[in-house]
Structures are given as C-alpha cells and as structure tokens.
Amino acid sequence: MLIARDDEERRSAEALGYDFTRVLTTDDLVSSDNCFFAATAITDGDFLRGVRFHDFGATTQSMVVRSRSGTVRTIETFHRRNKLEEFTSAASNTCSIVHEARLRSDSRSTSDCNELPVVVRSAVEPAGL
C-alpha cells in the first residue's frame, strides 16, 4: 500500500492515478524479469552487517541481486575518511565521530585518524552478464 508523506503529496499522486487503498503486489513493484536490487545495511540484520567505525573511517556491507541471472553479490566496502575530505567538508567531523564511536565500543583510544587498513577485500562473484 502506498503511503504519502503529507496531504499535498497524496493529492499530487492521486491526480496522477495512484490508488492509496490498493495493496501492491510484487508484480506491481517490479514487472520485468530483468531487474536489480541493491541494499546497504546501516544496522546488523539477518543478511548483512551494519556500519562499523574504524580509525580510518568505516566499513559497510551491501548485497546486489540480479533477477535475470540469479546472481547474488555481497560487497564489503572500506570508506576512507581521508578520501572523503577530497569531496566534502563534512569529513572534518568524521574523525571525531569515528573516535567517539571507537571509544564507546571498545574503550581504546584511536591512533592516527588517517591510518588505512592493511588489507582491503571485496567479495564479489563474477557478474555473468
């Protein structure tokens, strides 16, 4: 079932023909046999680990599914704080956030916030495209 964020959004959607009383099926959401699904965890769940904070930044785990081939990929990503600085000024707060999260999680102080992991792994099976 569709849910509008506010009355204005509901009126606009209804004007386009959307029905807020109808229960949607899988075929309503995805009508093709060739689609992709991707998810990145924020918190731990049954299939994926949530965000983990480290001295160098953070790690996330994602899953990508392709319906046509049945391929399921799990991807572990390292988000390096020092690389983030190249793209945004928000990175200036990242080091203190990582530092505080690390202190709360294991009572150890962090070393250098620019420290990088020794091993970077990616668990990706061949695409089979």
Image (spheres, rainbow, N blue to C red):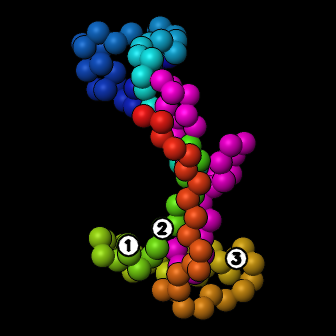
Residue 123, percent across and down? 59, 54
**Callout 1 amino acid:** Leu
Q: CA distance from mark 2 to mark 3?
A: 20 Å
Residue 68: image location, x then y, percent: 48, 24
Quarter occupied by residue 99: bottom right
- Report the residue at 30% width, 13% height from top: 14
Q: Earlier in the sequence, mark 2 or mark 3?
A: 2
Q: Which mark is residue 84?
A: 1
- Considering every residue shown, the one lying at the far bottom of the view is 111
Q: Are marks 2 and 1 in contact (CB under 8 Å)?
A: yes
* Secondary structure of residue under mark 2: strand
Going by the numbered disc 3, the residue's amino acid type is: Arg
Q: Secondary structure at mark 1?
A: helix
Is 66 located above or below residue 16 in the figure? below
The one nearer the camera, 20 or 112, is 112
- Under circle 3, the secondary element is helix
Residue shown at 29% from the left, 26% from the top = 8
Whole-angstrom CA distance, mark 3 to mark 1, is 23 Å
Task: Looking at this view, name the residue that lies furthest to the right.
Answer: 106
